[in-house]
Amino acid sequence: CYALGLAQARGFGGPTDRDAALATFQRACDQYDSADGCHEAGVQLAGEPSPDRARLDALARRACQLSTSACDLDASLHATGKAGVKDEARATARYGLACEAGNALACSSAASRIAHGSGVAADGPRAIGRDQLAVAVRQPGLVAVVAGAGLARPLPDRDRARAVGGDAGAL
């Protein structure tokens, strides 16, 4: 189901069909306990102008429950308030969980949030550690390989400077 949903969402073999993709991802989540299906259904739903917040929150929680590397969706929803409640501490914690499970994008997000003190006390050494983990996860040959890991970015110089006690005014 998940692969079919990707084909529908991206238009492989035909035109894109977001509604069909959402239904297919939802089926992968509900019937097959696919963390990727739950995650993608949530991503699709979050892209709608007025998403069903309860459904979106349930998809994010289920994705995270099935695979902690998929906790980045729950983190993003709580960082932005898109699921109805903005919770900076939960967002940072969920990015941390996904990072520890090998999600390089989540490591980068966690590093930036920790450097800025979003939901936690600003902690330069801890932010640098998350940033280094993001880089390590993206190296070929490691066990912790995540889809799209090549899109992850290291901690920006302005955040790195703040994390190591540099010019906080540059932010």
Image (spheres, rainbow, N blue to C red):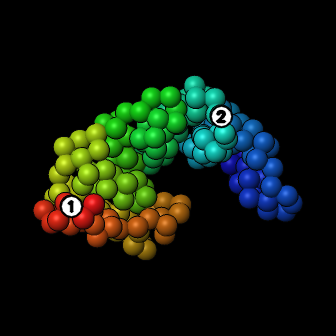
Residue that sits furthest to the front in the current view: 169
Question: Residue drawn 45% across and 29% down?
Answer: 85
- Which one is closest to the eye, mark 1 or mark 2? 1
Q: Splitting the image into 4 quarters, where does residue 45 fall?
A: top right
Spot occupied by residue 145 in the image (x, y as percentages of width and height): 46, 63
The answer to whether residue 5 is visible is yes
- What is the residue that sits farthest to the left in this orientation? 165
Say which mark, if any, is on residue 125. Answer: none
Residue at 33 percent across and 67 percent down: it is 156
- Disc ID at residue 169: 1
Nearer to me, 146 or 83: 83
Which amino acid is tagged 2?
Answer: Ser
Residue nearest the observer in this picture, 24 or 50: 50
Total numbered labels placed on residues in the image: 2
Q: Is residue 28 visible?
A: no
* Secondary element at tag 2: loop
The residue sitting at the top extreme is 54
- Residue 70 coordinates in the image, percent (x, y): 48, 46
19 w.r.t. 83: above or below = below
In the rendered image, residue 18, in percent from the top left (x then y), is placed at 76, 47
Q: Would you call the spot at circle 1 few (<14 residues within 10 Å), some (14-19), or many (20 or more)?
A: few
- Residue 50 numbered tag: 2
Query: Dividing the image into 4 quarters, which one contains the C terminus?
Result: bottom left
- Relative placement, left or right, of 42 versus 90 is right
Type of the residue with mark 1: Gly
